[in-house]
Amino acid sequence: MEREQMEGDEEGERSEELKEDKEAASTTTIEQTEGEEMGVGEVCGRAWWGCLLLLTLLAVSTRQMSLEQPPGTLWDEVHFGTFTNHYLNHSLYHDVHPPLGKMAVAGLAWLAGYDGAFEFKVGTLYPEGVNFVAMRSMMALFGASLVPLTFLIVWEVSSCLPAACLAALCVLCDTFMHRLNTLLLLDPLLLSALLASVFGSFKFHAHRHRAWSRAWWGWMTYTAFCLGVVVSIKYVGVFTVGVVGVQTAYHLVSLAFNPRRPLWVVLPHTAVRAVVFVSVSSVVYLSSFLLHFLLLTKASVNGGGLCHTEFYASFEGNEYEKATFPEHVHYGANITIQNSRPLCGYLESWYDLFPASVTAPCQQVTSATVRDDELLMWTIKKVNLTEGSVLDGAGDGEAVLVRSGDHVMLTHAATGRSLRSHGHRAPVTRRQLQVCGYGDDGVGGPFETWQLLVVGAPVGTPLSAVRHSFLLRHYKMECYLRANEMVKLPEEWAFNGAKEVTCTRNKDETGLHWHVNWNNSPKLGVGVPVRSLGVGLWGKIVHQHFNMFIGNAVLVETKDEERHARPWMWPILWQMQTLGSYVVNETSGEEHFAVGMTNPFITYLNLLCLAATPLLALTHAFYSKRRPGQCPAAVEDRRGVLAACGWLGLCWAGHYLPFFFMSRVLYYHHYCPSYLFSCMITGVIISWACRSVTRRWQYKGREKVHLFLLTACGASVVASYVAFFPIATYIKGVQFEENPRLNPYLDYLYAGQLWPEFGYRMDEYVSFTSTVIGSWNQSNFANTDLNATLYFSTPLNYTVEDRPAISPVPASSYDLWASRATL
Amino acid sequence: MYVKRLLAAFIDFSCSYILCPFQGDGESAPDTPPPETAPDSSPPSTPTTSPDDFPDKKLQSSPKATKSPQQKRARNSAKASQDKQPPLKLSLHVDGMSVTLFMVSFFTRIWRLDSPRGIVFDELHYGKYAGLYMQNTFFFDSQPPLGKQLIAFAAYLAGFDGGFKFERIGTPYDAMVPVAAMRMVPAFFGSLMMPTVYNLMVELGLSHYTGALAAFLMIFDNALLAQSRYILMEGILLFFGLFGLLCILKFRRFYSQPYSLPWFGCLILGAASLTACVCVRYFGIFTMLLGIGILVRDFWEMVGDRLLSERQLLGHLVTRCVIFTTIPLALYLSCFYVHLTLLYKAGPNDNIMTSAFQASLEGGLASIISNQPVKVLHGSQITLRHTHGRTCWLHSHDAVYPVKYADNRGSSHQQQVTCYSYKDVNNWWIVKKPEKEEMVVTEPHEPIRHGDVIQLVHGLSSRALNAHDVAAPMSPHNQEVAAYIDYNVSMPAQTFWRVDLLNADTTDGNWHAVESQIRLIHVNSSQALKFSGRQLPDWGFRQHEIVTDKIIDQEDTIWNVEEHRYSKSDDKKEREKDLMRSEMIPLERRNLTYWSKLYELQYKMLFNNQENVAGHMYASEPLDWLLLKRGVAYWISANSNAQVHFLGNIVVWVSGTVALLGYVGLFVIYLLRRQRSCYDLPDSAWNKFCTVGEILGIGYAVHYFPYFLVDRTLFLHHYMPAYVFKICLLAAMVEHGHYLLSEYLRAPRLARAYLAAVGVWAATVLYVFWYFSPITYGTRDLTANEVMSLAWRDTWDLIIHKQ
């Protein structure tokens, strides 16, 4: 191993200047790089500790600057502030991310003495009592931890002090890392937990030759713990789990391929890893949810339509708190029915008809998440198929319980129409059948008859309110009642927020399960308190997962007015993200803008190094194949650098490429984890370049040249930070001018500004990765002839125009019931 | 066994008729087993691998063979003996196996080719396109045209005039539609695929019987049959892809004679065939990448060869790069050249293209604008079209901006100006010079030139186009554009616009209808009139927003005049006289260069994905394909249960998936054991095993896994390219199983039993093929019970008419 030998006179850090730090970095290169597996404790050069401490100190101090700017809510602080309020007031909320990060933010706010009384709204100034600087400064501590973590990771993979210092310096001097990590957001927590777990996994694999030692166990548990934390902050943590998984798999495979060890040793290794990783991280994950529900005990106002009744009824302060109703349902009872899938809501109807231009003009049946009892009450009646009669359960007769397998008729209490389906197309989902209300004063026939099937219970089981989910199978059309949380009906003719209810023949569709949400069964007496029908802590966690995942799927809908970023724009800094602005001078209209934009110098440097890595790999492969006689030290060095870049590149790709295949709304800050790894690659590649340039230096003073190169690189990074410092804090400027007086450098470095519309247009055309719901409805609508004509119930020559008029079936013509369709 | 050998010798007249056109060196390339298996591996005791023992087998050349001096000598002596041959010797070799496979396959495909005589599934599209080719009518499709052209060519030869309207699936064909001729194209290519597969397998070092087995499984697979029997693209796509790969593999064996005729021939033919595959459907790019991958890998092997100097290496690299760029480019461009040359009439999807493109088509926009004057003057009535991106015209109507928007910002309450996507009388604007009052064209003409300042007056409401410092409704960073209403408040009119011609040189600085692309620069604020891309809410009737933007140099600020006429005074005679005097656009279509048409077409094809039919009843997921979960209903007779349902041969399908898993499992086991120096397979067999995985396994992966990342509706037929590789792998695994039994276990009886089992299995394949053939051919009426008996899985949605 040939490394640069530094003169002894340069040692340690000599001043607090940053550039000095670089020199300090290179002074001690030699000491740590002797030997592969040398731990920190053995190296322990003063310079190593000096660099780490200095960088940490700088990180902490820079991140504490200008925290009071802006003095109001900025960007997503609005969301996380609101969540904080929920935690401090113990009220339930709906969100698509797991709770740990938000709980931590709330905890920090609580430490800062915040009482949860400030209503976070876009663009409002913080009042006197809210110590937002303290909250932000605590977040900034997490943000500052990225710098030492970067240092440690790069040290772990490359064992090269200049590389570690350069990488940490890049992270330190990045404007977006500064801006983002000094706000009341999830990101500082997420990023530091993410780097901590990656560090843990590198550390763990560095101990692979000391398997079963105490440190080995320690690092494995630590990594698993951190992974649990990352995943419980945000689900992007799954990418980190993937990266660590690939790393683990690689080492297991190399263990299996090692001819010196028997094959069976793979088994205990695999088993131990699987057990520790799964158990520790799921304990962390589950306990974050446990804590979440221990804290949140009150229900939010009118949120019952968004989640299952079982779930909602188990919170305090809603309409179920003191209510009681019988557990079973008898015929003639008035009930409300809710879909068991979150966000689908209650089954409702009202006098309005479906427009005749769309489908058969009968009374609208939709689903809605807002509770309005008048629209929601349904009377359940029994249909006796053999006698051809309907038992409406009214009067004083004995109570007959609703049982699984019964044929029932559901009459809307307010309008007297019965729930019907027939051979007409649903208004939006044209491939499914329409569901509507039909018949006067509760009369109905075979098309109003449904079979009620309780899920997971034998035929004959009495239906329990809330607890039992059931399917409603149409007697004639043999289809199932379905609600779809993705399809909102057009506002031209439907109620605002009403979603489509259809009847589908496909039993595998989502949203087929319904439950009785409220039960007025007077003949059965008082019954049980509804809260006792609610679920316990574990049930809440299970339900919460359904709520989150289905909520996340709904987010796919792209907002047209939002100009969001696509992944390809991120590494080339195509767009910047405007976080918010505050007017500071009313007369001149001058404003302070906070922007989300990475340091352009570092960004383009990263891009260069990312491109250089595969080139270096190719060169290395070519040389080792054709020119074996090369200087072994150089070859060895290159191999080490490539291995380090390979692992870091895996981390980069693992946190970046999956975004290409996500169709949800994306923002620039989703690139942050990858950006950090990209900075690490930059550190490794730049320090290698400096080293290999000096290696060819024939004259004396070789070490000085090396030192000079490293210092120059470090200094230019720092200089760019100084130059772009406004981006990290705020930019002064006036909007709506011909030449906006933003930072003058921006125009040249922010590539997207030259063609700002292009990004938008690409988004409009590139629909490979995004499905816009509106457009697929359109294409469904337009493509009437593609497939549905083949389906057996619809005539082959069916067109939209010659739709037959709806033919009413009188309740008395039961002969229709006999000729039941057989397949 | 003896009979078999005799048979093989009989049919194997040896050597190529279609697949190896370069027979200059006297080596019987196609049927010699490839290098790895040659010296020691072919077990003489088994009929599957042995029967090709021909005298000229020793004469083969191969990359490995050249390395060993003995073989080199053998080759030299072969050359010497070749020299001694009489100078004028003609020899004809016919590969009997290939011919047989082709004939059998062709027969299965053309049997009752013209029934069902109705539109089967996507024949709807491809038939329609063929008809449009016949009528020279332009159409837009987001896939490249080669396959459609081949079908159109067959239709042309059969005398089709394109007069049939392809309306919906199931519509019966007229007598004049040459269904059989059109279906002949995929049938022919689909049958040609079988000998290609056979030779490909042989080229991979597998035995002839294995190759024939693979082809057999493909011939009797219902899915492949259906795809290559009706007017669909898969048959053509697969043939070109596989043939290209075959050429690339053949190319390997000319390693030792670089720059020879066959060397070039293989490379060029491979490049051409793979490009043709891409030209049929863009998905073929994956086949092409596979081919290039093989080349790159071979080149990398060559890099390790120290006998070659670095200069020679560079030469090889450059040659390959040149061939693999020029040929694909040339082919791709020329098939588009044919496309654009043939389609010169206006048609149904012109609207998607720009005005200039439309004007280059005969009869569409060209006929509308053919009588209109060219020069835009003071007093011209024009419609202004947004040139790039979304098709819409500058529009205004009798409605004003709401006083307050949803986000509490205020507006000017002036008349709305929008961009409207349909032709409408409200799209007309009158060009007016500020200093003149009368809005009629006067004598002498006052042309508008580059840099002139004008006003634009809305035709029906007579309000002028205005912009001012009020935030636009949807894009608050831009200025609002309105038609000015004088409310007599302190908000003066700012209605002056400067005309910036982008292509002023071509028109001598005059503003011409259609061809001039212009920007309208608002004089007071120096901002450009722009289509923002956002949609207005209900109060704006969901039309698109128009703003001005300070960033002038962008595509959305470009407009052009589409329709144009001169305003005249009320006097009708005067108007006619003026029209006579005005310059006229010549009646023939305007010429747009091939390159600009191609550029526009490409751009729209790549970024205008209109094929998405979400929520299709017969759509399936990639994971469903592995075990054939769902088919696709292709056609049903209107009055009986005769139908075509796209389903594969379930036996082949499932065995293919099992073989795939088996390969992966065996590979891992072998690899682990080799790491520990347990060499179960001799090197030659191991190399063969690896080659199979490298080409067929990776080929399968490359054609299958991309679908997991695609966010669009998928059907079973998207699996076909991957499926072909899976069948090949299946055949290879059958051979490997036999090898293990006879060589590794040395159990000849077991091996014979295994062969018998394979025979039974093949018979089952045949039986299942026959059993499902009614719904593949769709020629036979079925009763409901018969249909139900075919639905072996409850997820197969076969269709029964309800009585």
Image (spheres, coloured by chain):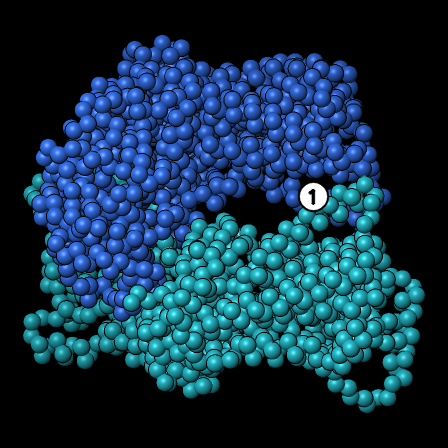
| Horizontal arrangement in the rendering, residue A213 relative to residue A333 (left or right) | right
* Residue tagged 1: A617
- Chain A rendered in what hue? blue
Q: Quadrant of the C terminus of chain A?
A: bottom left
Q: Chain of mark 1?
A: A
Q: Residue B553: image x %, image y %?
A: 37, 51
Q: Is residue A749 above or below residue B429?
A: above
| Horizontal arrangement in the rendering, residue B801 relative to residue B205 (left or right) | left
Name which residue type carries label 1.
Ala
Q: Secondary structure at mark 1?
A: helix
Residue B589 in sight in this render: no
Crowd around label 1: few <14 · some 14–19 · many ≥20 (10 Å): some
Q: Is residue B557 above or below residue A569?
A: below
Q: Residue A605: image x %, image y %?
A: 57, 37
Total of numbered circles in the picture? Answer: 1
The residue under the point 49% across, 53% down is B624
Residue A560: image quadrant is top left
Residue A628 in sight in this render: yes
Residue B745: image quadrant is bottom right
The residue under the point 32% across, 33% down is A468
Q: Quadrant of the N terminus of chain A?
A: top right
Residue sitting nearer the eye, A272 or A399? A399
Chain shaded cyan: B
